[in-house]
Image (spheres, rainbow, N blue to C red):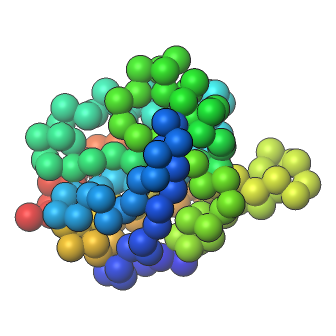
Amino acid sequence: MVEIGSTAPAFTLVNSARTATSLGDFAGKKVVLVFYPGAFTGVCTKEMCTFQDSMTALNGLDAAVLGISVDGPFANAEFAAKNNLAFPLLSDFNHAVVNAYGVALANFAGVEGYTAAQRSVFVVDKGGVVRFKWVAENPGIEPDYDAVIKAVEAIS
């Protein structure tokens, strides 16, 4: 599992337009990685909309937000459009990134064999080092949004 102070695992995933997007594309910026279990679920919708509502503050702190789920790019595209999300939603359909970050959630929602992303947030500094980590005890819990913004503010 990725820990505070470790280098964030590099990745390349497709966004909702099916274009490759890499963590390295954001080198020199602060990055908020928001792993969410599934598009169109109640808690995930509230969480992504809350991050969208925080975009002015986060952009002002030179931070980018990347949403990551195991959903396909087509579901992510519709989810982003329906909720007016202006930050990229990335599709980890092969589970490589949820496994690399240690946030794979097996048997999600009681569905045997279905692995989703555990709701979690990692804040990565401009040099690619993890400076904040939060992983939900269960997928129904939302992050402390103020704590995420404070973590971004604390990075020079």
Please say whether residue 39 is visible from this viewpoint. yes
Q: Is 156 on the left or on the right of 13, as rendered?
A: left
Residue at coordinates 46% horizontally, 46% vertically from top-left?
19
Task: Residue at the far bottom: name it.
Answer: 6
Residue 44: x percent and y percent? 56, 35
Q: Is 69 on the left or on the right of 57, as rendered?
A: right
Q: Quadrant of the N terminus?
A: bottom right
Please say whether residue 90 is visible from this viewpoint. no
Task: Residue at the far front: name it.
Answer: 19
Question: Quick one: 35 or 81, which is closer to the camera?
Answer: 81
Q: Is 129 on the left or on the right of 84, as rendered?
A: left
Task: Residue at the far right: name it.
Answer: 112
Residue 9: x percent and y percent? 44, 74
Residue at coordinates 30% horizontally, 59% vertically from top-left?
25
Q: Quadrant of the C terminus?
A: bottom left
Task: Residue at the far left: name it.
Answer: 156
Residue 68: x percent and y percent? 52, 50
Residue at coordinates 41% horizontally, 53% vertically from top-left?
21
Residue 52: x percent and y percent? 35, 30
Question: Quick one: 78 or 61, which is closer to the camera?
Answer: 78
Q: Is 45 on the left or on the right of 126, as rendered?
A: right
Q: Is residue 70 above or below residue 9?
A: above
Mark count: 0
Which image quarter: residue 84? top left
Residue at coordinates 87% horizontally, 58% vertically from top-left?
113
